[in-house]
Amino acid sequence: MTKTFSLRQRRTAGFHKIIGGNLQAGLKPILALTFGLTVGAVAILALGKSPFAAYEALIQGAFGSRENLAGTLIKTTPLILTGLAVAVAFRAGLFNIGAEGQLYMGGIAATWAGIYAEGVPGSLHIILVFLAGFFAGAVWGAIPGWLKAHRGVHEVINTIMMNYLAIYFTTYMVMGPMSVDDFTNKTHEIASTAKLGVLWDIPAAELSWGLLFAIAAAFLIHILLRRTTMGFQIQAVGYNPAAARYSGICVGRTLVLVMALCGGCAGLAGTIEVTGLHHRFYAQFSPGYGFDGIAVALLARNHPLGILLAALLFGALRTSDRLMQLQAGVPRDMVFVVQAAVIFFMSIDILRPISRRWREIGNGNGRRKEVNE
């Protein structure tokens, strides 16, 4: 017997498949955030404080004034780029925990180019600085990619170790060869031609053009993954490396290129921090943007455009934690409790039973069928 379906039934099946596939992708981050905030509220209640007052302070601290909004966007900028550095690696089946170290290497290279690249015309100096930051981060990312592709060394171990190498190397540079003097842990200020312009000039917080660069990078990565041959190769390697190799894709080269691209994105995060915010390099100047990028990528489900919203959320949490402590009397570390809860709920399949039911409906269970003998 051959089972046939009418055109209407086939369209209905396709609709159910779309719903089943997109339901979890769309609702899971929202539910994870909701559960994370709920866990945070329970913890705040356990401290004898009001969660309503705490979350009101969070919102006010992130968006309550122009200065607070600018501060949120300043912290959002590096999180977009480090989130991309993690998300693209995830698409290729890699776990890049080295965005922090790649950010440091990009920052120190950009600082070096901004200080010591003398004689470069002003219009080209900022380009040179960005190229130096991107290239340094790309090299730092390509090393674990090469070791993974050609020696089988797991990228998690490599990238964790290289984080410490980058942090201690840059600390040596700012306290030694690039130090202002023997008693400070910062470099000289970069040249004026190496500084990014101000996008939003507010006395308490100057928001640079780096935010637009980060947003543009998210859109470019989205186009790369969806519309180019390289993007297809990246996702094919992530889905099934053996099948990708059988189809003619050079898996090893793809892994190295992916990690180089991820390192370059994180390097740009460090570059923008130097050229748009600090205008010099400090020892251990990142508050953990590389590690927060992992949470950003997870919450966005590795979607480049979703990273924009996820980075804004974590940027808001990082900006408003101090006001929450001052107004609501809740420790600043409560923000990390919320972040950890969001990551935990993102790592479990909350909606799997619902999405499975939609797929079953889309595959024909419960539909009226026509049977031809």
Image: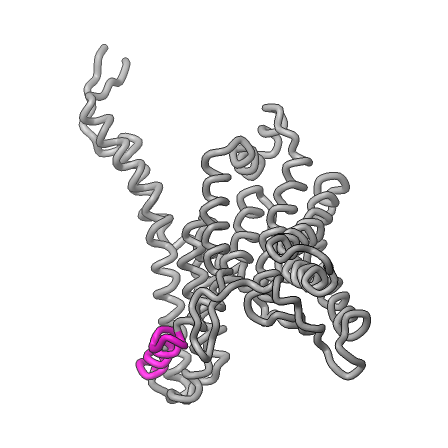
Q: Residue at horizontal 55%, vertical 66%?
A: 276
The answer to whether residue 149 is magenta is no
Q: Is residue 207 visible?
A: yes
**Residue in the foreground of this view, choosing between 119 and 248:** 119
In the depicted structure, whether residue 121 falls above or below residue 68: above
Total marks placed: 0
**Magenta span dominant secondary structure:** helix
Q: Is residue 156 visible?
A: no
Q: Quadrant of the C terminus?
A: top left
Find residue 178 and report its horizontal and vertical position in percent.
77, 70
**Residue in the foreground of this view, choosing between 17 and 262:** 262
Find residue 38 and report its horizontal and vertical position in percent.
36, 71
**Residue in the foreground of this view, choosing between 360 and 307:** 307
Q: Residue at horizontal 42%, vertical 89%?
A: 326
Q: Residue at horizontal 72%, vertical 54%?
A: 158
Find residue 225 and report its horizontal and vertical position in percent.
49, 39
Q: Quadrant of residue 5?
A: top left
**Residue in the foreground of this view, choosing between 263 and 41:** 263
Q: Which residues are magenta?
A: 51-68
Q: Quadrant of residue 62?
A: bottom left
In the depicted structure, whether residue 23 falls above or below residue 103: above
Q: Quadrant of the N terminus?
A: top left
Q: Residue at horizontal 59%, vertical 29%?
A: 244
